[in-house]
Image: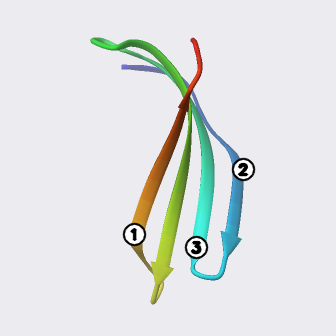
Amino acid sequence: MAVHTARVLDTAAGDGVTMVVWQYDYTHKEWGRKNYTQVSVQHWRNDKIVREQFFYDSVPA
């Protein structure tokens, strides 16, 4: 796999929840070129992540 871009676009934090917006652009041996935005949402309790969710938005490469 060749990673072209992997960068944080934005972050947010609230009471017991954090969010990170990522932008990925890479070429996979079997899947070809992929370019998408991912939002990861982490739910925290006692300084540990107790649940994490991922949301994706694909864009043409």
Q: Residues within 10 Å of mark 2 (few under 14, many from 20)?
A: few
Residue 52 position in % (x across, y down):
42, 62
Residue 58, compared with residue 10, is above or below; it is: above
Q: Residue at x 44, y 57 (%)?
A: 53
Judged by depth in the image, the label closer to the viewer, 3 or 2, is 3
Amino acid type, mark 2? Asp
Q: Secondary structure at mark 2?
A: strand
Quadrant where the image shows the N terminus:
top left
Instruction: Specify which label sits upstream in the sequence, 3 or 2.
Output: 2
Residue 19 quadrant: bottom right
* Marks 3/1: CA–CA distance: 10 Å
Say what amino acid the circle numbered 1 marks.
Arg
Residue closest to the eye, 51 or 8: 51
Percent coordinates x, y for residue 12 in the rendering: 70, 63
Q: Residue at x 45, y 89 (%)?
A: 46
At x 64%, y 82%, the residue is 15
> Which residue position holds label 2?
10
Residue designated by label 1: 51
Q: Nearer the viewer, residue 28 or 16?
A: 16
Amino acid under disc 3:
Val
Residue sitting farthest toward the bottom: 46
